[in-house]
Amino acid sequence: MVHRRISVVVRLVVALCALPTVGCASHSEWVTVRDTPRNPLAGTLDLVSPGGPKPTERTRQLLRRYDLSGDFKGDRAALLSRLEDIQRREPNREHEYAMAELAYITAKQAEQLKRQKALEFYGTALIHAYRYLFEFENDRGRGRPGSPAINPYDPQFRGASDLYNQSLEGMLRLVRQEGELRPGTSRTVKTANHTCSFDVVMHSTGWRPDDIDRLEFVSDYKVQGLRNHYHTYGLGVPLIAVRRSHAAGQDPAEHFYPPDVCFPITAFLRVDRPARLAGRVELREAAAPMTTDPTAPHFVLELHDPLDRQSIDVAGRGVPLEADLSTPLAYFLNQPEFQDADLSTKGLLHPSEARNLQGLYMLEPFDPDKMPVVMVHGLWSSPITWMEMYNDLRSDPLVRQHYQFWFYLYPTGQPFWISATQMREDLALMRRELDPKREDPALDQMVLVGHSMGGLVSKLQTVESEEAFWETMSDHPFSELYADPDVVRSLASTFYFRPNPSVRRVVTLGTPHRGSPFANGITRWLGGKLITLPTKMLEGRDQLVAQNRRFFRPNAPLDIKTSIDSLAPDSPMLPALLAAAPGPWVRYHNVVGHDPDPGWERYLVPEGDGVVSLTSARLDELRQLRSQITVPADHSSVHRHPQSVLEVRRLLFEQLAELQQFPYGTQVAGQSESPL
């Protein structure tokens, strides 16, 4: 109850005082479950209308032409058999489409009451749609009569694609009722003439087959927590793969993945030898090893990672995959343990508890050949604040081909230089575990993207401390400090450091480089009352002062206890950071927010994003500043603004263009010396 009251108080205080930064909008639900799965055939075939489902007018016309209209109300298997006979005599793509459509309608009608019948007709519909899309060109190539080349302008072509996708999804839903469809498993496919295999095979350069714990259907969910929804069209069924965690030690990247991380998968059923069908297709679970029938059609259910590839080769043609990148991300974020408000509040009010969660997180498989983009959140925030930008950037094929995205989580209640020290150690730990021999040059092209206080944490990874930061503490040499060895080592790592040689670019967005007026007497007092710092840290500070009387400056950072204190305009570490010499290989880019419609905050921040003034946010004098833009956004949304996302994407493209001219392991343009 006490904790709940404190949480309410701090939320009210932050809302009123606009502490820099309220970094992320909270979403109660990132996805919702649809009443009925999304189906592009619902309107075309009247699937949900009282009189439906029913075939399209083109299929009804074909039935009239062959005097088969009355047969639709009778035995559907017999009707399909008659159409198959017609197809043998008069091969035509229109016949295949009609059979696919009729079989699909029959499957939908049987789905609720006759599972096996529905399964058979879904398989029949799928194979006829497959033949419509791929087999006629091959028939002509073998000297057989066939239809004219496929017409991509014919709406029936997209209809055949939808029939293929929805038949496959309907079949997979029924098959999954008997157990998860995991890579390496198989089923038996029985037609009127053949028995053939139904193998499940995974194609991914990053995830392993045993990474899949379960599969969910994208069509069951509606995204509402992400502004943009990235869905590409083609063939296949988009799925959500929920990852299974593995025992530590199997993979050095394992502990960088959060629990139940989700990733996109597209299921595609390949028919290597699609033999003619005399009726229905029967699918049943494999009970024993099958004998091989060399004339049978061979089915392979391929699970493709759409982040790896956007198209596959089918029958000698490049075929785009139907894929959904946003729904798996939103599904992952919908887990209760990743609710941003709770995670952010713990990091602000209870830094010692948040230390257990601190570190780098990966939502994609680690790839030593991709350059890392590390996103660093601000005060009272968490990595969730980056999901809009991440969703937008990852949608670009060129970006995801060359970059991997990591997220840094840290306790935001402590001074930003303490967080920077911990990030420095965490980045070093990552490199030791993932690339101990430093053989992966892509990891030396790291890009840091920091919002608000996260920009200060990021910038501190790239500068030379020399004596400047220690001189904010004391006029005495560090060597004269009297303290326990552990305290000496801790202070040395905080105030003496070298720029990280692997960081090439730093992008800061809405960062208070000269502090913020919202870190004032009132908010600093409230922060001191509400933020619970580790007891060990406070006791260590008191002991250090007692052991070194008249050693520290009156306004030394040692007296700064919270992140709110550290962001005050009179914080001594801010000018030291502004004046610190960056590594000569680092390039800086800055995004400044200018709120077009400020509220009462204008009285404290006349010009700026409502929390950080233009003067504090700009970096005009920084020698290695390569770009600086102003976007019309307030502080809490500057890093999600479309112009900010486009600017970060432009910088990633710029780095890629430079590296194509100056490959990994050589100097990049503008470097005066090697960082290594």
Image (cartoon, rainbow, N blue to C red):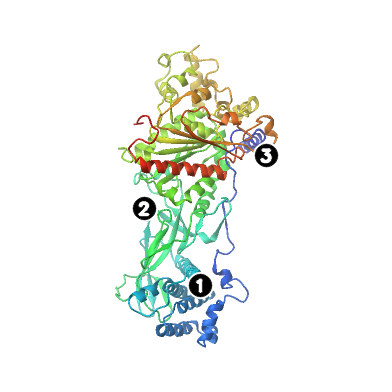
Marks 1,3: beta carbons within 8 A: no
Q: Earlier in the sequence, mark 3 or mark 2?
A: 2
The residue that label 2 is drawn on is 205
Relative depth, front residue between 118 and 568: 568
Q: CA distance from mark 2 to mark 1?
A: 35 Å
Please tell me whether residue 147 is drawn above or below residue 639 in the rendered image.
below
The residue type indicated by label 1 comes to Gln
Secondary structure under the numbered disc 2 in the rendered image: loop
List x then y, in percent, for residue 180.
43, 62
Please tell me whether residue 238 is drawn above or below residue 548 in the rendered image.
below
The residue type indicated by label 2 comes to Thr
The residue that label 1 is drawn on is 156
Tag nearer the camera, 2 or 1? 1
Quarter containing the C terminus: top left
- Residue found 65% across the figure and 30% down from its top: 605
Is residue 180 visible from the viewing direction of this image? no
Left or right position of 646 against 130: right
Secondary structure under the numbered disc 1 in the rendered image: helix
Relative depth, front residue between 208 and 287: 208
Q: CA distance from mark 1 to mark 3?
A: 50 Å
Quarter containing the N terminus: top right
- What label does residue 597 carry, if any? 3
